[in-house]
Image: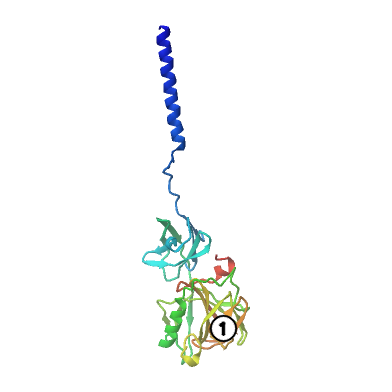
Amino acid sequence: MTIDNRARSSQSSQVSRNTTNLFLGILTFLPVTLALPVEALQVQVSPTNPQLGDTLSVIIDVDSQNDANQPKITVGEKAYPAFAVAPNKYRAFIPTTPLEPAGTRTVKIFGDGQVKNLAVKVRPRKFPIQRITLPPGKSADGATEYELKRVAAFKALQTPEKYWNGKFIAPSKARISTIYGVRRYYNGKFATDYYHRGVDYAGAAGSPVTAPASGRVALVGKVSQGFRVHGNVVGIDHGQGVTSIFMHLSRINVKEGDLVKAGQLIGGVGSTGASTGPHLHWGLYVNGQSVDPVPWRNKVFE
């Protein structure tokens, strides 16, 4: 190769290098948009090994917290409300009951423009059988229309505010006489669509009944008003779809609208309504369905 040719080749290489450097320099200043993968919707369900009667807690983490981004949760045709519990975090409760079949439920979560399907297996649970003989004049089927409407409206409450904090406590110091979920015969007839919707405490007549958690008194009913089955009754709204009902009371120490704290006196054990003897019935409801109160005493539901 001649000297002139080598010079021209060197000049050509230098031009090529300058052009490449210029191109790379331009790229340095150009905005770069990368197609990053969308982060999957973050969802946690507890307990991890639920059984019938348990309350399923669904925690959803979202990118931003606003009304438009509030998650939606469904199981089949049933929708459950989600409430904000922390920045960018929502929680929904799904009740399970003894009248439902055990097996896998598909929980569908809508949020952050995504849809996530979770298969949750609910274990079967054996519930005892109990035979009840009611005395003449008392019947489990004798509720008045007024009584039924008031109680149904109370159980359907889904107040956005959360009143409770921490574990629930026992509303009576008496021993438990009947557990949640018991199936019953009343005067020899099996109650097909019935299960014991709560826990009974065998307290002495007049012994204290206290609030298991903070809340607002949303129901006060008396036998004189037509509460033939529930008897004298108090209902506490704990907020966000969680309510407690206390039945067969001998006395009532609160009025509707009162705000009560955990451990506060609300009434006395009695035998009013459809009752065979003095005891307290405590029913815990989540989104209108009766759930086992025991897990709520053993763990904190956020």
Q: Give the residue at x 40% y 64%.
A: 74
Q: How many labels does the image show?
A: 1
Residue 258 figure quarter = bottom right
Please tell me whether residue 232 is drawn above or below residue 57 in the rendered image.
below
User: Which residue is rendered at x = 44% and y = 60% of the image?
Assistant: 69
Q: Label 1, on which residue?
A: 279
Task: Indicate the quadrant where residue 191 lies.
Answer: bottom left
Q: Residues within 10 Å of mark 1 (few under 14, many from 20)?
A: many
Q: Is residue 11 above or below residue 137?
A: above
Q: Which of 40 and 96 is in front in this view?
A: 40
Q: Is mark 1 on a helix, strand or loop?
A: loop
Q: Residue type at mark 1?
A: His
Along the line of sight, the residue nearer the viewer: 68 or 278: 68
> Percent position (x, y) of residue 212?
58, 75
**Residue 176 at x, y percent in the picture:** 58, 76
Image quarter where the N terminus lies is top left
**Direction from residue 106 to residue 219 in the image, left or right:** right
